[in-house]
Image (tube, rainbow, N blue to C red):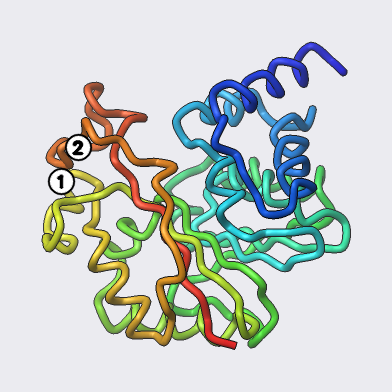
Amino acid sequence: MTIRIFFVAIFVATIMPGLVHANPAIAERIEAAMAASDRPEGHVKRDATRQPAKVLAFSTIKPGDVIADLGAGGGYFTRLISGIVGANGKVIAQNPPQWIEKYKGITPSLEILTKDRANVQALTAEFDALGLDNASLDVVTMALIYHDVTLMTDTAQRATMNEQIFAALKPGGVVIITDHHAQKGSGNVTTDELHRIAGDMVVRELEAAGFMLDAQSDALHFAADDRTKNVFDPAVRGKTDRFVYRFRKAN
């Protein structure tokens, strides 16, 4: 075991004692994915605030799964998911063309990732024109980006997106959505200013597409956050109160 892997293992055991999965083998795969030697140091540094082990344990992702990581950016979660699903699985890292143009680091990061990991595919597509195969996906993830989607789309476009996600999932498939809580009932009124969204709005929009809210986790709950500050405010950055929802497509 290298020094780096040793310290990642200590991090998982001490900072994330809540890592629990029905199948202990999945927890081991999550730990191994986090300890992978090819993870960029910048990704590792983000683990303390993103708590990926808890979120991934909650996600139901397992070896052999086909996953779409929507709004993947440079692939922070994509790389972790890749390690869990393994050689028999697949991860599609989607970004809209606007992000590819605006954030110049996405393309080179994903080029490195797809070179490192044969089971990762980069996809440039609008959120309401995903082009995913029907009934081919086991899990869809949207990590801290649903609020961004609401700034880029109207209600009808998001309805189309969610309907496409529903169609792309296998029966029993799930969608994992995490985001920064806004005040309950505020929708996305403060999203542009605070980069937050009301969880009840997300639930309402996913249920309208046919999903059921299967479970939610308090893995990213921070009671001290009153949900009124910009998520980049030093007083709350990395400590925002975030929801973690798992939606399921009925069998």
Using the image as rendered, state which of residue 4 and residue 95 is in the foreground.
4
Q: Are marks 1 and 2 in contact (CB under 8 Å)?
A: yes
Precedes in sequence: disc 1 or disc 2: 1
Who's the residue at 24% across and 35% down the image? Answer: 223
Residue 61 against residue 39 in the figure, above or below: below
- Locate the C terminus by quadrant: bottom right
Q: Crowdedness of circle 2 by 10 Å Cα count: few (<14), some, many (20+)? A: many
Residue type, label 1 = Glu
125, 138: nearer the viewer: 138
At a point 58% along the width and 21% down the height, the residue shown is: 14
- Mark 2: which amino acid? Asn
Left/right of residue 119 with respect to residue 214 in the rendered view: right
Q: Quadrant of residue 222?
A: top left
Instruction: Please identify the residue farthest to the front as the structure is shown.
Output: 22
Q: Is residue 82 left or right of residue 208?
A: right
The residue labelled by disc 2 is: 230
In space, the residues marked 1 and 2 are separated at their CA atoms by 7 Å
Image disc number at residue 193: 1
- Image x and y of residue 3, in percent: 79, 11
Counting other residues with Cα less than 10 Å from the Cα at mark 1, is it few (<14), some (14-19), or many (20 or more)? few
Helix, strand or loop status at disc 2: loop
Instruction: Report the residue at 30% width, 57% height from top.
Output: 147
